[in-house]
Image (spheres, rainbow, N blue to C red):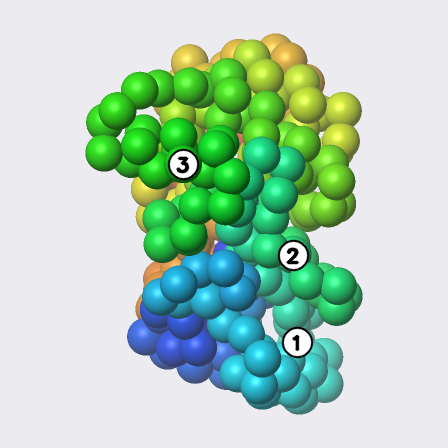
Amino acid sequence: MKLTGDYHTHTYYSHGKGSPRENVLAAVALGLKSVAITEHASAHIFYGVRNEKLLRLRREVDALKKEFSGDIEVLMGLECNLTGDGKCDIPDDPFDVLILGFHKGVMPRDMFSVRAMLQLIGIGKDPTGNAEALMRAAEKHGVTMLSHPGLYIPMDIEVLAPAAARLNIPLEINGSRVTLTKEQLVRGKELGASFIINSDAHRPEDVGRVEKAIAAAVEADVWDRVLNLLP
């Protein structure tokens, strides 16, 4: 199996260790066709990239796009945060890749997000409500993919997969921490969902390193539904 693109990588602009250039060079060395720099969006208290810092990142990524145009497609992305029921922090500015997921480190803004925070400390579980809130935001804001479904708070695959299939939004099989179980992957495929494998790299040496995710896709026999994987 060969990965064609890695659409979820971080740098020192948020909580990664390397530079955008180092991530691109790592992707080129692996022979990838595409790589995206996807820092956390503004609502994340600790890692959100905003204002002048975000503008500086965009300028740097734009320069890398030109520099490496003959070698690899470099994409400007953003990993956005679910901030409430059907709400997220996707900005108005255009991005090549928009990832949406639930993260810790986001201040509660409505009763859904308060309940989600309580779930983080083991008070209550609402996988159906969580998935519905996420998919309402995904549909409203036109996201590219969903990051690490089920990380931090549970997500009902019976809600997530058909909605994602209808919206043509792939579910991520995360290379650093596979959050979807074999059963969820199998059921997701049955319900029409597609998948995308990303490294979620926080160091340049981890870009494109997705062995765990590929193994999970093969074991669940969903590899043929992974959009950026070739046999």
Is 91 or 220 nearer to us in this picture? 91
Mark 2: secondary structure: loop
Task: Residue 206: give x, y in percent of width and height.
Answer: 36, 62
Looking at the image, residue 81 lies above or below residue 50: above
Q: Residue at x 63, y 36 (%)?
A: 86
Callout 2 amino acid: Ile
Callout 3 amino acid: Val
Q: Residue at x 61, y 11 (%)?
A: 190
Figure quadrant of residue 36 = bottom right
Task: Residue 53: give x, y in percent of width and height.
Answer: 53, 83
Q: Which mark is residue 71?
A: 1
Callout 1 amino acid: Asp
Q: Is residue 117 visible?
A: yes
Q: Residue at x 68, y 62 (%)?
A: 91
* Earlier-in-chain disc, 1 versus 3: 1
Q: Residues within 10 Å of mark 2 (few under 14, many from 20)?
A: many
Q: Which residue is disc 3 drawn over?
A: 114
Q: Looking at the image, do the residues carrying marks 2 and 3 touch, with CB atoms under 8 Å apart? A: no
Q: Residue at x 44, y 60 (%)?
A: 44
Q: Real-space Cα distance between discs 1 and 2?
A: 29 Å
Is 55 or 63 nearer to us in this picture? 55
Q: Is residue 10 left or right of residue 120?
A: right
Task: Residue 56: give x, y in percent of width and height.
Answer: 58, 87
Q: Real-space Cα distance between discs 2 and 3?
A: 20 Å
Q: Which residue is disc 2 drawn over?
A: 90
Is 32 or 167 nearer to us in this picture? 167
Q: Real-space Cα distance between discs 1 and 3?
A: 46 Å
| Mark 2 or 3, closer to the camera | 3
| Mark 1 or 3, closer to the camera | 3
Q: Is residue 39 visible?
A: no
* Earlier-in-chain disc, 2 versus 3: 2
Task: Residue 131: give x, y in percent of width and height.
Answer: 54, 25
